[in-house]
Amino acid sequence: MTKRTIDFLRNETEIPKETLQDLERNRQRILNYKVKQKSKITRYRKPAIVTILAVAAVTLLLVNPQINSAVRNALGISQDTGIAVIEDNGMENELNLVSKSNNLEITVTKFVSTRRKLAFDYQFKITDEKLKNLLVKNEQAVDPWAKTVEFMDIELYVDGSDQNIYGGVFGGPTSRVEGDMFYGSYIADFIDDTIPENAKLTLRITRLAWQDEEEIAAKMSDAMAAPDPTTTFTAENTVEYVGDWVFDIDYRPLTQTATPEISNVNNLSDIQVKSDALQTVVKFKAPITEDSRTAVIIYKDGTKLDGVMEMGSQYTDEVSAAFSLSTLDKTDSIYKVQLNEIDSFGEPIQEIGYFEFKNE
């Protein structure tokens, strides 16, 4: 994402502050349409739209894209490779927690967390034909923008405290419809170690909302055609459920951590790599400036991995990223972290530096 586009987004006062932070901190994920807007009304500026559409022409939807086997629930959190590993190691995450609010009953069927990540599956019966028709309509849309029109507001509490610790995160929901059942998943990555160790957690869902992809596409087209380059448009939620669905989680955060072995360093410094049960976070310094456009690429035994999330830093020369490598994955694979300079379409221009590491 260009600095000019980020500036336009920063100046757009109707976008929530937390969303602006996500946009700037997680540029690669923006390119892949996976930073979630939590505002009731979505408002866009034309220059940002032009960049997003240009990227859409060359970018696939790539967050947690691992395809499930028949053994695992299709499109659930088990498709995340880190979660798949803990399941393969016999760690339980299945639940059957039910909560009802405003005539909607939601069941959380899976939940798992570490200090920096949480994920859960949930489901409910669709009784609103308007919602069902909208979901089917959006699912049939060919525009990748349709993947950004689903929103969920959640809160997270530690037993004995009324402080909502859910914040400083990026991620969001995905879903599918089968008959009259809605199946959703939510994966969120925290920027810091936010969830306390051995915490008894309570999850609250306070809002579910969906927008009409066709309406957004039409308004976007009109805004792009307008002669004024700062033309904006708004899109209100088509369907919205507001309530207070509360779930007391049975499983404590997973505490397994490790420090992988680093090797073969080129042009990067102050490298830190830390793995937990669900993901690995890398942080390093690189010879880049505030105006640099960069992207982190991670390879496993020479094969590029998808679903890498670039996270922000207060320092212009510091880069950090996370991906779903569990510390419980004891294969002898070599991982290569490569930093590239990219153009405004997200395509690599040149390599800046790299290093390798492996789980011990």
Image (cartoon, helix red, strand yellow):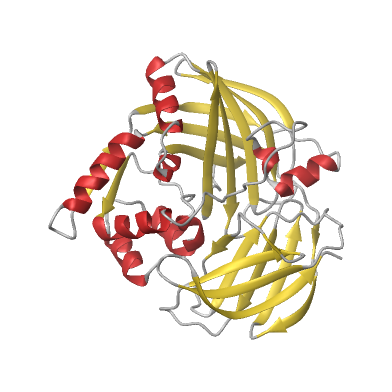
Q: How many marks?
A: 0
Does residue 188 sit above or below 266 in this rendering? above
Which of the 4 image quadrants contains residue 58?
Answer: bottom left
Measured as percent of width and height from the top left, residue 201 is found at 66, 39
Do we see residue 161 in this rendering?
no
Residue at x 52%, y 39% (from the top left corner)? 173
Measured as percent of width and height from the top left, residue 141 is found at 41, 35
Which of the 4 image quadrants contains residue 301?
Answer: bottom right
Does residue 307 sit above or below 142 in this rendering? below
Residue at x 57%, y 73% (from the top left corner)? 319
The quarter in which the N terminus is drawn is bottom left
Measured as percent of width and height from the top left, residue 359 is found at 82, 64
The quarter in which the C terminus is drawn is bottom right
Q: Is residue 77 left or right of residue 176?
A: right
Measured as percent of width and height from the top left, residue 107 is found at 61, 23
Do we see residue 69 in this rendering?
yes
Q: Is residue 134 left or right of residue 120?
A: left
Residue at x 31%, y 55% (from the top left corner)? 49
Q: Is residue 24 left or right of residue 84?
A: left
Does residue 182 sit above or below 357 in this rendering? above
Residue, far left: 227
Q: Nearer the viewer, residue 298 or 279?
A: 298
Residue at x 72%, y 82% (from the top left corner)? 265
